[in-house]
Amino acid sequence: MKKKSLLALLMILMLTLCLAACGSSSEPAEEPSEEAVEETTEEVAEEPAETPAETPAAPEDVVVDAENHTVTITAQLNGTFFDQSTMHYCVWKDGGAGDMAMFAAYCTAEDFYNGMIEAGGEPWNTTTDKIADGEFTDGQKVDVTLTWDGQDTPVTMAESVRSADGDLSIDQRFSGNLDNNKECGSGCIACLNSCWAGVTSNAAYGFNAIDSGEVSAFLNDSVMPEDGTDVHITFALK
């Protein structure tokens, strides 16, 4: 009886060991592997930076091109001088001679003078010295041209004017004369004969040649636009 009890105990032990060995062999659930997340950066085509629109020059602006030694101003044509002679080609509109000029400039004579200096000009007269009747101005040569809406091809100063007998000779110079200009208050930017007040003046004729009647100077109505037209006048230093 003792043998049977021992055998039964041994069988129970073996069965227990077997059950333990065959117990759940399930492995813990694997955590899902992290997938590499691709950061898709949307490629946005870079648009070229917008170039700011160039601000048009205001009428009173003095436009200086130092590289090409030019100064451009804007002035209004006075049609009175298609038929009336004057020595005043271009004068500041609020200057003492503003209503006696073929062109009334929106800029002052002093601003124009400073523009000529900035463009590399060398004024002839930097004093208060004055020339007398019949005497001639001097200084750096200046070529003068004009354009306006509808006229992109520059018209020369000589083409823009005439005398009673035909052409008017032009030999424009950077006379300077700033101190005299301020003193007399004329506002003269360009004169059609030699002058002690004009920032530029025409060395082809002596001082007072036009006012004395020695020669006449008119706007050329076969070339120039109508009264009140704004024109751009460019002075190129030589």
Image (cartoon, rainbow, N blue to C red):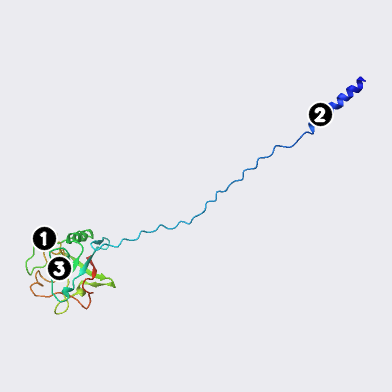
Q: In which quarter of the image is residue 176?
A: bottom left
Along the line of sight, the residue nearer the viewer: 164 or 65: 164
- Spatial CA distance of label 1 from label 3 is 19 Å
Residue drawn at point x = 86 percent, y = 25 percent: 10
Query: Hey, what amino acid is under mark 3?
Result: Asp
Report which residue position mark 3 lands on: 99
Residue 77, compared with residue 180, is above or below; it is below
To which residue does mark 2 refer? 17
Q: Quadrant of the N terminus?
A: top right
Labelled pair 1, 3 in contact (Cβ < 8 Å): no
> Quick one: label 1, few (<14), some, or many (20+) residues within 10 Å?
many
Judge whether 44 appears above or below 18 on screen: below
Is residue 110 at least partly visible in the picture? yes
Q: Distance between the residues labelled 2 and 3?
A: 127 Å
- The nearer-to-camera label among 1 and 3 is 3
Along the polypeptide, which appears first: circle 1 or circle 3? 3
> Which residue is nearer to you in this view: 168 or 227?
227
Q: Residue 121 placed where, x, y %? A: 20, 61
Closer to the N terminus: mark 2 or mark 3?
2
| Residue shown at 21% from the left, 67% from the top | 75
Question: Residue flagged by tag 1: what amino acid is it?
Answer: Asn
Secondary structure state at the residue bearing disc 1 = helix
